């Protein structure tokens, strides 16, 4: 019978994913319901349009005016997402810069009298900030730990991970980032800003947070996962645009790194959102230049202007630049592998003990980081300040934590500076400016750069994975710019040309490490050009990115893919695995019995099936008079739970309300079947039914999707994979080979134009021979 060949779509997806090699055993628990590494549940999203009667009835009532207003609301939400993300970025940056500024100012004033007292104050301030961050994460918003990019990438890939887009996650991300970055840990705030933008977009899309009574019905416009996915995409691009003041880079980052589905209309809205973010950030920075924002002034946001750096390069320099790309690929791949091992060890052994262990771990790493950043510069001898022109703008020395080069730290003479303290005992943004700086040849010694590279690389590996919001962009730039400057020092000495700048090689090193670790190319290239304001270096950045990515790909996957595997997030990659070509859809499904419902189902049977398994979609079948099986469609678990909870569609008769198969009037609107984003929704345990209710029936015809996607049983798994991923599906039916064909659709049949005179639609008068 046909029903024996039907396969549950979630089961198909589960078995498809099981064919993909994973670093974790037991990644999937049950069928249709996945589990992340921390035990939280993962469900697939319904990006497919469920064309049930409620949906069609709602669509029939919509006119052109409604469609126009709907599009206008999308643009309005894009505007709100840009403003909200920009303001959140401004708040985070102002807070981080002021905490860091107060910390360094207080420490520097104390070390004038006693270095030991200054050391104690420095360690305590960092410890308090980090403790506040880890306390917020562990007690209030566990989903806000880490960068959040793997989780958002999973959401846009079709997975709904509980908690990642909630209001408390947004609050935890913002304040946790302030504490962790302000506390001097070897991590950045750029990744968390992407997650912050996604949370803001999601909350706007669902009308706010009902749990904290911060919701508005005026904002509850978008009721489908497809529309919310578009908003979250805008939020991701806005986060990158806010972090780097790189609107074009934000758009390309969303396109290249996080999204699995794209269209031209979305491109326009994402670009508009990023532009709004740039305007908001620029306005805030202009307002802060007058001194109204404390220590946050002309700096603060991550931008390192090297437009006055190296203007030209020779062909002979391409070899050391290629070497930088190879080094970036090797160190980036090593970084990914080390973080994989350490994070797995943390999850399997350390973090299983108790929440208190996470707090102690973060505080211990904070103390170690503070001791290293304060203690190592004490062991380094100071160097005399270089002789510079008065018009060069270079001031030597400068106190720690102040904008500029040549930091005076533990020096006997006034006209001396500590090169290791210039990059170590400083904020990350200022340290990168110093490494990128032009006209500062011989400022750093090779010994200091090697010391910083080894220690900061180790700290970055150990810190990544702690229970605090952590981004890897800025630490990656610091690591890469350090060995890039080392190579630049060698090039300056070997070629002996005055036009070669060490800062140029530092920039190329930063790009190479990010490319070797994150495996981004186009978006990263544009971001590096935007944040350095030097278009002349574009070909060189492209060169090192291509080399570093090729070298890194030879060893392992990118950082976010590795972290997604560790968290049990089953991402569907862009390309299916090669072995899928030899597997058919029938073989992928296996031979397990399909759980299905008749068109009119008894309430007791529905409850029993929902309690006995975790499937999220069920075929609905019926039988004709001659005994043949008829596929009515697909009904979702969430829709069945709504029907059981409301009870208004229960009936005493086991017969269809409309025997002809037509749709009857129902007592639900489409919005009742919408599940809140990143929420568990209704559970079968939350529904209480009496014995009389269990003896009644439900006609499922008005609530099912009558047109699910169907594939023949002998279709290759590669085709099924591409169809599943590119359309953002949650279920696919697998059926036997069809016995007859009722029609053939070609390109000509899909070219439809509006006839304004009659209001009807007609096909374009193109000869069929042109297409068939």
Image (cartoon, grey):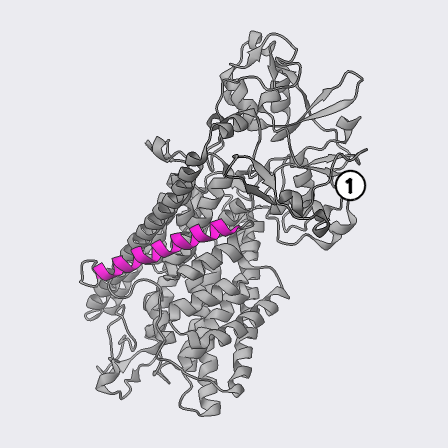
User: Is residue 745 or residue 306 the one in the foreground?
Assistant: 745
Name above or below for residue 515 compared with residue 221: below
Q: Is residue 714 left or right of residue 107?
A: right
Q: Which residue is mark 1?
A: 587
Q: Does 280 lie within the magenta span? A: yes
Residue 5 visible within the image: yes
Crowding at dot 1, Cα within 10 Å, few <14 / some 14-19 / many 20+, comes out as some
Name above or below for residue 670 compared with residue 354: above
Q: Is residue 101 left or right of residue 273?
A: left
| Residue at x 49% of width, y 48% of height | 152
Q: Image quarter for residue 138?
A: top left
Q: Give how far across and how far down residue 671 sits, in percent.
A: 46, 28
Q: Which residues are magenta?
A: 263-288
- Give the prevailing secondary structure in the magenta stretch: helix
Q: Image quarter for residue 75?
A: top left
Question: Which quadrant does the N terminus fall into?
Answer: top right
User: Is residue 634 or residue 391 the one in the foreground?
Assistant: 634
| Total count of labels | 1
Q: Does 377 lie within the magenta span? A: no
Q: Give how far across and how far down residue 557 sits, in percent.
A: 60, 59
Instruction: Pick out the residue farthest to the bottom.
Output: 496
| Residue at x 64% of width, y 32% of height | 707
Q: Give how far across and how far down residue 632 sits, in percent.
A: 67, 25
């Amino acid at each position: 019978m046909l029903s024996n060949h039907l396969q549950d779509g979630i089961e198909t997806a589960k078995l498809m994913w099981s064919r993909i090699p994973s670093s974790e055993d037991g990644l999937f628990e049950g069928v249709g319901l996945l589990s992340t590494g921390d035990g939280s549940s993962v469900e697939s999203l319904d990006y497919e349009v469920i064309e049930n009667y409620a949906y069609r009835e709602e669509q029939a009532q919509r006119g052109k005016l409604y469609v126009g207003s709907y599009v206008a609301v999308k643009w309005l939400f894009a505007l709100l997402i840009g403003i909200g993300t920009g303001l959140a970025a401004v708040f985070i940056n102002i807070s981080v810069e002021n905490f860091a500024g107060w910390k360094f100012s207080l420490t520097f004033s104390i070390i004038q009298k006693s270095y030991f007292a200054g050391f104690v104050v420095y360690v305590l301030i960092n410890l308090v900030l980090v403790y506040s961050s880890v306390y917020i994460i562990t007690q209030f918003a566990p989903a806000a730990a880490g960068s959040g990019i793997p989780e958002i990438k999973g959401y846009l890939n079709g997975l709904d991970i509980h908690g990642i887009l909630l209001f408390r996650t947004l609050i935890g991300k913002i304040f946790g980032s302030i504490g962790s970055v302000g506390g001097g840990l070897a991590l950045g705030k750029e990744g968390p800003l992407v997650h912050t933008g996604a949370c803001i977009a999601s909350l706007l899309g669902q009308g706010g947070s009902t749990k904290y009574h911060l919701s508005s019905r005026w904002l509850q416009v978008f009721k489908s996962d497809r529309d919310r996915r578009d908003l979250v995409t805008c939020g991701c691009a806005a986060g990158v645009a806010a972090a780097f003041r790189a609107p074009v880079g934000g758009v390309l980052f969303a396109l290249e790194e996080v999204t699995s589905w794209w269209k031209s209309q979305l491109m326009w809205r994402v670009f508009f959102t990023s532009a709004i973010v740039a305007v908001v950030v620029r306005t805030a920075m202009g307002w802060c230049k007058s001194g109204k924002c404390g220590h946050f002034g002309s700096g603060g946001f991550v931008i390192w202007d090297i437009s006055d750096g190296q203007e030209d390069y020779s062909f002979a320099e391409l070899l050391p630049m290629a070497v930088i790309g190879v080094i970036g690929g090797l160190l980036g791949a090593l970084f990914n592998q080390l973080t994989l091992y350490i994070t797995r060890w943390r999850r399997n052994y350390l973090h299983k003990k108790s929440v208190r262990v996470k707090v102690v771990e973060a505080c211990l790493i904070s103390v170690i980081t503070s001791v290293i950043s304060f203690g190592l510069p004490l062991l380094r001898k100071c160097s005399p300040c270089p002789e510079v022109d008065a018009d060069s703008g270079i001031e030597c020395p400068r106190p720690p934590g102040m904008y500029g080069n040549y930091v005076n730290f533990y020096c006997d003479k006034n006209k001396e500076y500590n090169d290791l303290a210039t990059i170590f005992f400083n904020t990350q943004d200022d340290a990168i400016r110093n490494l990128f700086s032009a006209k500062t040849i011989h400022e750093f010694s090779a010994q200091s750069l090697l010391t910083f590279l080894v220690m900061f690389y180790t700290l970055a590996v150990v810190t990544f994975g702690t229970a605090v919001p952590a981004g890897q962009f800025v630490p990656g730039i610091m690591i890469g710019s350090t060995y890039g400057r080392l190579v630049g020092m060698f090039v300056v000495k070997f070629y002996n040309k005055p036009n070669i700048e060490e800062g140029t090689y530092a920039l190329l090193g930063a790009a190479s490490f990010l490319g070797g670790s994150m495996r981004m190319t186009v978006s990263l290239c544009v971001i590096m050009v935007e944040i350095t304001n030097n278009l002349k270096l574009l070909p060189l950045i492209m060169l090192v990115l291509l080399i570093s990515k090729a070298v890194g790909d030879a060893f392992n996957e990118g950082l976010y893919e590795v972290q997604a595997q560790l968290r049990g997030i089953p991402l569907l990659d862009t390309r299916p695995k090669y072995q899928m070509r030899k597997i058919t859809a029938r073989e992928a499904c296996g031979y397990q019995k399909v759980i299905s419902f008749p068109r009119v189902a008894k309430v007791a049977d529905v409850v029993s099936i929902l309690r006995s398994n975790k499937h999220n979609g069920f075929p609905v079948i019926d039988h004709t008079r001659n005994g043949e099986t008829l596929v009515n469609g697909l009904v979702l678990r969430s829709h069945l739970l709504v029907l059981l909870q409301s009870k208004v569609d229960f009936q005493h008769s086991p017969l269809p309300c409309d025997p002809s198969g037509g749709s009857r009037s129902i007592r639900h609107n489409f919005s009742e079947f919408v599940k809140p984003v990143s929420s568990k929704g209704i559970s079968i345990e939350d529904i209480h039914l009496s014995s009389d209710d269990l003896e009644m029936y439900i006609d499922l015809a008005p609530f099912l999707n009558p047109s699910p996607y169907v594939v023949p049983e002998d279709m290759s798994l590669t085709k099924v994979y591409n169809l599943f991923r590119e359309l953002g599906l949650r279920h696919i039916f697998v059926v036997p080979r069809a016995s007859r064909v009722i029609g053939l659709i070609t390109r000509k049949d899909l070219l439809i134009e509006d006839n304004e005179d009659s209001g009807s639609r007609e096909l374009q008068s193109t000869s069929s021979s042109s297409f068939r």
